[in-house]
Every structure is written in structure tokens, then in C-alpha cells.
Amino acid sequence: MDLGPHAIFILACYGAVAIVLAALTGWLVLDGRRQQRAIEALEARGVRRRSGAPDRKDVR
Amino acid sequence: MTSQSITQRLANPTRFMALSAAVLPWLAAVAVAVTAYGLYLGWNAPADYQQGQTIKIMYVHVPSAWLGMMGYALVALSSFGLLVFRHPLADVSAKAAAPIGAAFTLLALLTGSLWGKPMWGTYWVWDARLTSVLLLFFLYLGLIALRSSLDDEAQAAKLTAVLALVGIVILPFIKISVEGLAIPSLGLEIPAWNTLHQPSSVFRSDGPKIHWSQLYPLLVSAIGFSLVFFALHMKAMRNEILRRRVKALRLAEVDRARGPVAAPAE
């Protein structure tokens, strides 16, 4: 497809959207894994919430 | 039996985590599919008679700008829910929405700037629309910075919520900046400010001023971007709930290490 004389601006826009959304998604996925690992490490040491409620795997 | 609203049913973080665990994979998949379809339609939509192929920028710029503003409305609404109703997930929602709204506002600024150069001959002008959207971006950064500067989480939530509600005044400014506002019955007339930015072509009292061949891909793209926003917001809320659980578990660990506290002597 011929994007005309302003192709670089069009491609830069779509590239910026891809980079920003990929970075945001990656950050959220990694952050979620980090929190989940922290919970698993604490539970492996026998720590339970004050309420005594177990941190069920199915609600994560 | 009392009937509960959906916000009341979701007030329990454990229930929210269970529900969102089931919904999120589907929401993410639909969001990616609809966004890809919208961008595919936009990529193959006819060129504009004035703007040529740069009209393709519209299919990412306009949804980003809408979501930048919608994200702030969500932050403000969640803040209202915290301050007025003390909803347990309101602060989680406000905190989760801020960086996502900031990212979409940044995209609106970036893509708008890249659209402005070939169409206006400049990347940036300090006019009403562009400056007010830049202020919205700084407002997001201010909310994030204020929250992270305070150790007391409850105090940080309240102060951030107050700032978010004060800052919502930016949203009508962004809208009015290129279109003005006239309410004859109130004798109110705010003229449109001097700006290079065109008025809205979609949400107008006299109907959309954009051809269907361009409007349809734009709407599909906007729906796709909105679904992406909500999927990211749901994931960010889940992360925040997990973070608070980690904090609670660490406090419980410290308490356990201290041992049982002796009862005061009579």
C-alpha cells in the first residue's frame, strides 16, 4: 500500500501505539507475577492473613 | 432477600478476584481481536480528500484521546466512590486507572503531534486543546507522584482522591477549548478558543460530520481500544489487590515474629 509522502508519520504513530501498549501490558503482567510470587513465598513460610482466611489459588 | 447492585456485589475483593480471574482472559482476547479488526478496517479505509493517507492516524489518535479523558473520569468517579461511599475497591480502581489513563493521554499527545506536522506544519502549538490535554497528562503524573510520596496508604488514598476530584475541571475545558459552549437559557456563552485543532466530527448535536467509510472503522477501533483499557484496568486492579495482600501478610509475619502480646497486668 502506498502511504504517500507522509508515510513516516503514519508508521511512527502506529509504532508508538504498539510500543506504549506493549510496555504497559508487559509491566502489568510482570507486576502481577511478582506479587503472586511474593504471596507464595510468604505462605510457604507459614504466614497467614490475620483474618485466618487462606489465600486460595482460585481467586488469584 | 435484599437485592445488591453490581458494585455492592463486587465490594468484596475476594469475590472480585474470583470473577475477574474468569473474565479477564476472555476480555483480553476480545479486546485484541476487536482492536485488530478496527485497525485493519482503518488501514483499508479510503484516503481523505484533504488529508490523504494521514487520516489513518485518526484511527489511533481519536480513541487514545477519548480514553485519556475517560480514564480521568474513571479516576474521579472512583475517588468519589472512596470519599463518599467508602467502597472497598474504589481506591484500588482509582490507583489502577491512573497510569493507564496517563499512557493513553501520552499516546494522544504523541500521535496528535505526529499528525500535526504534515497537516499543520508543526508538531506543537500552545493552543487551548493541545495545552489542556498536556495539563491532563501532568495531572495524571501529579496523582501518581502524590500517592507514591506518602507512606500512609489510607492518607495517600484520600489526598489523591481530593486532587482527582478537583482536577476533573480539566475535562470540560478540553471539550470547550475547540467548540465553545452556549446555553442560551442560562445566558451562558463561552466562545471557542483560538486553536488549530478541528472540532469534534463524531459527537455533535447535528450528527457526525464524517463519512461512514471512515466513521465505521473509527468506532470499531474505539470500541477495541476501550476494551483494551478495561482489560488493562482489571489486570491492574488485580495486581493492586495482590500487593495489598502481600503487605497484609508481611505485617502478619512481623506480628508472628514478635510473639503473643502479654495482657496488661490488672
Image (spheres, rainbow, N blue to C red):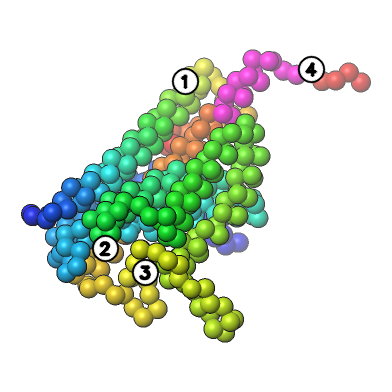
Q: Which residue is mark 4?
A: B262
For the point 60% across and 49% down, the residue is: B163
**Which range is magenta?**
B247-261
Query: Going by the image, does A42 lie left or right of B105?
Result: right
* Discs 4 and 1 lie in a common subunit: no
Q: List the residue tagged with mark 2.
A: B218
Q: Residue at x 42, y 27 (%)?
A: A34
Q: Is residue B115 visible?
A: no
For mark 4, does the 10 Å Cα neighbourhood hold few (<14), some (14 to 19), or many (20 or more) residues? few
Q: CA distance from mark 2 to mark 3?
A: 16 Å
Mark pair 4, 3: CA separation: 70 Å
Q: Nearer the viewer, residue A51 or A9?
A: A9
Of tags 4 and 1, which is closer to the observer?
Answer: 1
Q: Residue at x 31, y 75 (%)?
A: B208
* Viewer-proximal residue among B224 and B60: B60
Q: Is residue B258 above or below residue B30?
A: above
Please rate how many residues cluster around mark 2, counting C-alpha atoms within 10 Å: few if below 14, some from 14 to 19, many from 20.
many
Badge 4 marks a residue whose secondary structure is loop
Q: Amino acid at mark 1?
A: Ala
Mark 3 or mark 1: which is in front? 3
Numbered disc 2: what chain? B
The location of residue B168, given as percent across then percent down, is: 55, 57
Q: Main secondary structure of the magenta part?
A: helix
Look at discs 2 and 1 and give the one toward the viewer: 2
Residues at marks 2 and 1, CA–CA distance in whole angstroms? 46 Å
Report whether mark 4 lies on the same chain as mark 2: yes
Sequence-first disc among 2 and 3: 3
Label 1, residues with CA under 10 Å away: few <14, some 14-19, many ≥20: few
